[in-house]
Image (cartoon, rainbow, N blue to C red):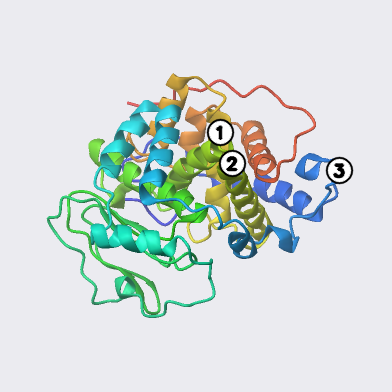
């Protein structure tokens, strides 16, 4: 079981050292926030600061919500991206997506169609979401790995993956995750048909894949170091987000690029005040981006090996051993990785681009 520092009783590899990753990432983020580099955001006349309000995801979502996605289209886009990146990820995602249907069947499809013509409205607060109630119970013994509800655009208030055999968990003063007594993870999702829903559905699928990989390796969610789940899910999210940014449909590519830019720049902006790898999101989302940006340049075998290591397929590992598997173990290489993650988030190009280190075999008896 993982302790508070992210170490694990079953883990005997590279020691967990978050500062070796966070410190250089923070330094590079502060540099970007100052906006004192002419190459920021690709240079040219668009010199800008990461603290600009233009990079607020809350303000960006209404602007990019015009392109709506059906649930079936979203599933197809996600599966295609994961299959293209790593066939094993694709196989796991295909099985998970096989039961991704609206919980109320045809009525859900009718709601999806009706909501498609509504304007985006993120101002309404769903303060009485029944799924967040302490009294909400998840169905036990179900075959489906999903509980999906169609909601109007901007009204998605539920995106979570409940690990297999997990207990009820309090997530806020009046918000709870129910116990999941099933032998498989269950994703609960309020789908609003926007690019945001597509990207974060991929995120939750990343959690479910990691739960499955871990189970296949003989571990449970309790064995996974506390700082790892979000990094695992963000890898899947970045794989899909990048595929959408490069989609042949220019409308999809445009909204995906704007969503990515707002999300990443907000993460960079928030990093200086949110450096905890467990409680905060900036470090996990940027670490996931750094890993994806590196792996997409590697061959299929390397992508598969490192992805499996990250997602628990080789047993419980902390992020430092995963990065070592990818070739980032020395202080210098970790600095290079952290800087590259910020560059990928901001669109900034480093002055010199060193060849990525060769992956290392860090398996231990």
Front label number (3 vs 1)? 1
User: Could you say which is closer to the camera, residue 224 or residue 89?
Assistant: 89
- Name the residue rendered at 57%, 30% in the picture: 294
Residue for point 30% across, 43% down? 97
Q: Which residue is mark 3?
A: 38
Does 80 appear above or below 152? Answer: above
User: Does any portion of residue 204 appear in the rendered image?
Assistant: yes
Q: Quadrant of residue 337?
A: top right
Percent position of residue 28, x then y: 72, 46
- Identified at 64% across, 64% down, the residue is 59
Q: Extreme left residue here?
A: 141
| Label 2 vs label 3, nearer the camera | 2
**Secondary structure state at the residue bearing disc 3:** loop
Q: Are marks 1 and 2 in contact (CB under 8 Å)?
A: yes
Ranked by sequence position, the earlier of labels 3 and 1 is 3
Q: Earlier in the sequence, mark 2 or mark 3?
A: 3
For marks 3 and 1, give the CA distance.
31 Å
Crowd rating for badge 3 (residues with CA inside 10 Å; few <14, some 14–19, many 20+): some
* Residue 190, placed above or below residue 320: below
Give the spatial CA distance, label 2 vs label 3: 26 Å
The percent position of residue 363, horizontal first and vertical second, equals 39, 26
Q: Tell me if 150 is positioned left or right of 25 in this view.
A: left
Q: Marks 1 and 3: in contact by CB < 8 Å? A: no
Image coords of residue 357 (percent x, y): 60, 23
Residue 178: % across, % down: 26, 67
Q: Residues within 10 Å of mark 1 (few under 14, many from 20)?
A: few
Label 2 residue SS: helix
The answer to whether residue 13 is visible is no
Q: Secondary structure at mark 1?
A: loop
User: Does label 1 or label 2 sit earlier along the sequence?
Assistant: 1
- The residue beneath circle 2 is 253
Residue pointed to by mark 1: 248
């Amino acid at each position: 079981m993982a302790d508070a520092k992210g170490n694990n009783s079953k883990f005997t590899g590279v020691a967990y050292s978050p500062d070796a990753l966070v410190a250089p990432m923070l330094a590079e983020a502060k540099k970007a926030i100052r906006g004192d580099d002419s190459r920021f955001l690709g240079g040219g006349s668009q010199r800008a600061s990461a603290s600009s309000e233009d990079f607020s995801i809350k303000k960006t979502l209404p602007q990019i919500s015009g392109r709506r996605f059906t649930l079936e289209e979203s599933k197809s886009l996600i599966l295609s991206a994961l299959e293209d990146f790593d066939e094993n990820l694709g196989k796991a995602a295909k099985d998970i997506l096989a039961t991704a249907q609206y919980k109320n069947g045809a009525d859900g499809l009718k709601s999806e169609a009706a909501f498609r013509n509504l304007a985006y409205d993120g101002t309404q607060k769903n303060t009485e979401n029944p799924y967040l109630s302490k009294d909400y119970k998840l169905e036990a013994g179900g075959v489906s790995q999903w509980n999906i509800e169609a909601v109007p655009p901007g009204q998605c208030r539920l995106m979570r993956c409940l690990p297999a055999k997990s207990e009820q968990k309090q997530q806020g003063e009046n918000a709870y995750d129910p116990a999941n007594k099933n032998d498989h993870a269950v994703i609960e999702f309020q789908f609003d048909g926007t690019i945001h829903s597509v990207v974060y559905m991929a995120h939750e699928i990343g959690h479910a894949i990691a739960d499955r990989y871990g189970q296949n390796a003989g571990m449970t969610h309790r064995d996974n170091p506390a700082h790892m789940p979000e990094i695992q899910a963000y890898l899947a999210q970045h794989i899909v987000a990048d595929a959408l940014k490069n989609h042949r449909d220019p409308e999809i590519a445009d909204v995906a690029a704007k969503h990515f830019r707002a999300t990443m720049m907000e993460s960079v902006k928030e990093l200086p005040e949110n450096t905890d790898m467990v409680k905060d999101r900036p470090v996990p989302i940027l670490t996931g981006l750094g890993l994806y940006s590196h792996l997409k340049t590697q061959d299929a075998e390397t992508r598969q090996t490192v992805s499996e290591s990250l997602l628990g397929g080789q047993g419980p590992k902390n992020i430092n051993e995963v990065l070592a598997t990818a070739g980032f173990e020395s202080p210098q290489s970790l600095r290079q990785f952290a800087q590259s993650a910020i560059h990928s988030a901001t669109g900034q190009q480093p002055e010199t681009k060193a060849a990525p280190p060769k992956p290392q075999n860090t398996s231990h008896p």
